[in-house]
Image (cartoon, rainbow, N blue to C red):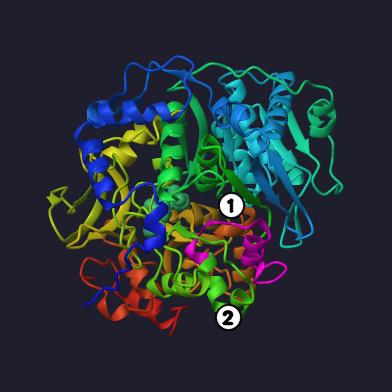
């Protein structure tokens, strides 16, 4: 099998921070002497009290504990804002591009400082103190970034909930970390459509009451106002000072919680802390995107996901970068929008998800080629494996064969990018995330946990800690240990399958647990199942992923109805609506199959392997079905499958 290889272009090499020799040298030092390496690179951020200890981490199952720079103190917001004032106060920190192309705004570091301080003072006025949790449920407007940095400034721990989640999901996440304050907007605006954020907050707070709701005015739409609880941000901000002393925080004080789905149970509150996280987010941002002063950088993620935390806000701002924040969607008002925004703001570095690339690829080349894009120098991909067809289109059509693509593999849990090319150092292979970042030691293990050497395939683990790693599951350290350190003792288990080729390149093959990846959004099949069985007509449900042209994976639900219920098309629609209301639109099942019975072992365990095969329409290789309690159910499932070629 011949594999396409794309060498580092000469122009990229000429300005790059590291070439291959330098990568090799730095990588070797990072794994042979982590104390020395991170002791040096930990100095890239400003410390109030410098650390004297670097690494204190244990992956030992009986004592999992992760601490970096543990005796240092700092403030993350001061690192992202104040420390740039002297040198680049008038440089643009955030370019905000509205949903409507007529709206945009540039915010300098000086202005950012004033805004963040005001927001911090409003938080203080609402009684928010160091250590308190604050839930943020916001559209992609600059106030979302101000709110994050304001929390960091006063030492509060933010928990952002993506604006596409339902009131129930929001309530669960408010309760999960006992937030007393929610920051939201009247409405969001995406693709010309309004998102009823405040109305959702009101509903969520019926289940999970809070002391205060701070509301930013975005659209001016009609919203309810609860006296004594609700505060208009613009009114409160007008009354407070635009300076606010940053709180001195320990390196291991929590910075944020972000809920993410796993293979079992309700979403976990992934906890990230301050010093190590910021060091790692800023260092990866600089090296992976080869960021130089003056570059305009755009990551199209939402701040509701970890990509938005690390690579719209914390990493870029810690580096004094110009970061673009986009409120809208790739196809509004036309499928040229991304490229028009690149031209309008002269974007040099563009970072997006394969699902967006596939959707735009389907719309035809002319939407791209009619734009200029000559400012683009580097392209990035994140969220799911990028198929070679999408990679090639991104490379040839969008980047005109000029721009390397960094395919960055990481997770909410990892805080920052773990495996990725470095543009000046790494020859590219379409579909491969290539090589580990400094300090990251991947290994591939078999089902028994035996480490496999050389070119091989298996499950991806990381054998030692890096500064950006999550520290715990908020309020449940045992769940942290059981989820990530119990499967393969002594290693962090990623949940991903992976192949390593003869050149030592890593190829992520997708999740090996019951987590699916729908348009780059991570979804636990168990969550969708519990939403389905909460419907009065549903007796049992099993959910699996199946290959989907644009979304990467689609959601396929097998549903067994209560005795006497009619399996109608109407009911399917009702179930989709029900799941959207329970979790949010991102969890909508794409295909529903009514199943009189599910394939179970004699002990009653659902055989998901079989359900996955049928959903994939590849049931001629069902494997061993001899342990099935009732083999006949399989024939019915095959006959009535919903994904027929
Ligand atoms: C899962 C993590 C961290 C960014 C956004 C997603 C998959 C992520 C890649 C990639 C192949 C990828 C993995 C991972 N994934 N990036 N470049 N190539 N797979 O964060 O929601 O925590 O999901 O996304 O399966 O485990 P997340």
455 in magenta: no
User: Relative to 539, is 578 on the left or the right?
Assistant: right
Q: Name the foreground residue: 633 vs 24.
A: 24
Residue 356 appears at what percent x and percent y? 54, 65
Boundaries of the magenta span? 331-355
The label number, if any, that marks residue 364 in the structure image = 2
Q: Residue at x 30, y 42 (%)?
A: 438
Q: How many marks?
A: 2
> Can you identify the residue that label 1 sits on?
583
Can see residue 330? no
User: Relative to 139, is 538 on the left or the right?
Assistant: left
- The part of the image, by quadrant, that contains residue 514 is bottom left
Residue 382 appears at what percent x and percent y? 45, 56
| Placement of the N terminus among the 4 image quadrants | bottom left
Q: Secondary structure at mark 1?
A: loop
Q: Earlier in the sequence, mark 1 or mark 2?
A: 2
- The part of the image, by quadrant, that contains residue 640 is bottom left
Q: Nearer the viewer, mark 1 or mark 2?
A: 2
* CA neighbours of label 2 inside 10 A, class few (<14), some (14 to 19), many (20+): few
User: Relative to 333, is 543 on the left or the right?
Assistant: left
Residue 508, above or below 105: below
The label number, if any, that marks residue 126 in the structure image = none
Can see residue 84? yes
Q: Quadrant of ligand 1?
A: bottom left
């Amino acid at each position: 099998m011949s594999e396409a290889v794309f060498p580092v272009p000469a122009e990229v090499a000429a300005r790059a921070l590291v070439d291959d020799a330098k990568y090799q040298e730095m990588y070797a030092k990072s794994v042979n002497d982590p104390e020395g390496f991170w002791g040096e690179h930990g100095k890239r951020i400003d410390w109030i009290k410098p650390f004297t200890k670097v690494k204190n981490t244990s992956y030992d199952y009986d004592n999992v504990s992760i601490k970096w720079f543990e005796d240092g103190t700092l403030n993350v917001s001061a690192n992202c804002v104040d420390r740039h004032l002297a040198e680049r106060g008038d440089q643009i920190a955030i370019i905000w591009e509205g949903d409507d192309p007529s709206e945009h705004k540039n915010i300098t570091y000086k202005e950012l400082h004033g805004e963040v301080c005001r927001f911090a003072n409003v938080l203080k006025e609402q009684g928010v103190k160091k250590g308190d949790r604050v839930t943020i449920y916001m559209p992609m407007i600059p106030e979302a970034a101000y709110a994050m940095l304001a929390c960091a400034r006063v030492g509060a721990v933010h928990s952002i909930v993506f604006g596409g989640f339902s009131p129930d999901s929001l309530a669960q996440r408010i309760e999960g970390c006992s937030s007393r304050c929610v920051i939201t907007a009247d409405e969001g605006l995406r693709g010309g459509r309004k998102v009823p954020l405040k109305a959702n907050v009101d509903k969520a707070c019926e289940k999970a009451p809070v002391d205060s709701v701070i509301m930013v005015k975005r659209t001016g739409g009609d919203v309810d106002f609860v006296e004594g609880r609700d505060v208009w941000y613009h009114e409160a901000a007008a009354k407070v000072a635009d300076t606010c002393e940053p709180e001195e925080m320990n390196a291991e004080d929590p910075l944020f919680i972000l809920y993410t789905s796993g293979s079992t149970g309700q979403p976990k509150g992934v906890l990230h802390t301050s010093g190590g996280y910021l060091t790692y987010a800023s260092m990866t941002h600089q090296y992976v995107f080869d960021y130089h002063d003056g570059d305009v950088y755009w990551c199209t993620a939402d701040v509701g996901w970890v990509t938005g935390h690390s690579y719209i806000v914390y990493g870029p701002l810690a580096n004094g970068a110009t970061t673009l924040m986009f409120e809208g969607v790739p196809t509004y008002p036309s499928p040229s929008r991304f490229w028009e925004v690149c031209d309008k703001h002269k974007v040099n570095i563009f970072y997006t998800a394969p699902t967006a690339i596939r959707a735009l690829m389907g719309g035809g080349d002319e939407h791209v080629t009619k734009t200029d894009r000559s400012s683009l120098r580097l392209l990035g991909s994140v969220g799911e494996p990028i198929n070679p067809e999408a990679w090639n289109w991104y490379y040839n059509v969008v980047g005109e064969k000029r721009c390397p693509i960094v395919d960055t593999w990481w997770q909410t849990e990892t805080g920052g990018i773990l495996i990725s090319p470095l543009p000046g150092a790494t020859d590219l292979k379409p579909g491969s995330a290539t090589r580990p970042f400094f300090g990251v030691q991947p290994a591939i293990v078999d089902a028994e946990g035996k480490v496999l050497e050389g070119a091989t395939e298996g499950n991806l683990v990381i054998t030692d800690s890096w500064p950006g790693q999550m520290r715990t599951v908020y309020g449940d350290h045992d769940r942290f240990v059981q989820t990530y350190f119990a499967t393969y003792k002594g290693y962090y288990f990623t949940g991903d399958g992976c192949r390593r080729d003869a050149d030592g390149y890593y190829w992520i093959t997708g999740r090996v647990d019951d987590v699916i990846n729908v348009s780059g959004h991570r979804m636990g099949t168990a969550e969708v199942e519990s939403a389905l069985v909460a419907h009065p007509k549903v007796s049992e449900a099993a959910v699996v992923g199946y290959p989907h042209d644009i979304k990467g994976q689609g959601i396929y639900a097998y549903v067994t109805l209560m005795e006497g219920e009619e399996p109608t098309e109407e009911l399917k629609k009702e179930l989709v609506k029900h799941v959207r209301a329970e979790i949010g639109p991102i969890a909508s099942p794409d295909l529903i199959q009514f199943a009189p019975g599910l394939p179970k072992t004699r002990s009653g365990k659902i055989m998901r392997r079989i359900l996955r095969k049928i959903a994939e329409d590849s049931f001629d290789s069902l494997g061993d079905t001899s342990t099935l309690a009732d083999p006949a159910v399989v024939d019915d499932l095959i006959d009535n499958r919903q994904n027929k070629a």
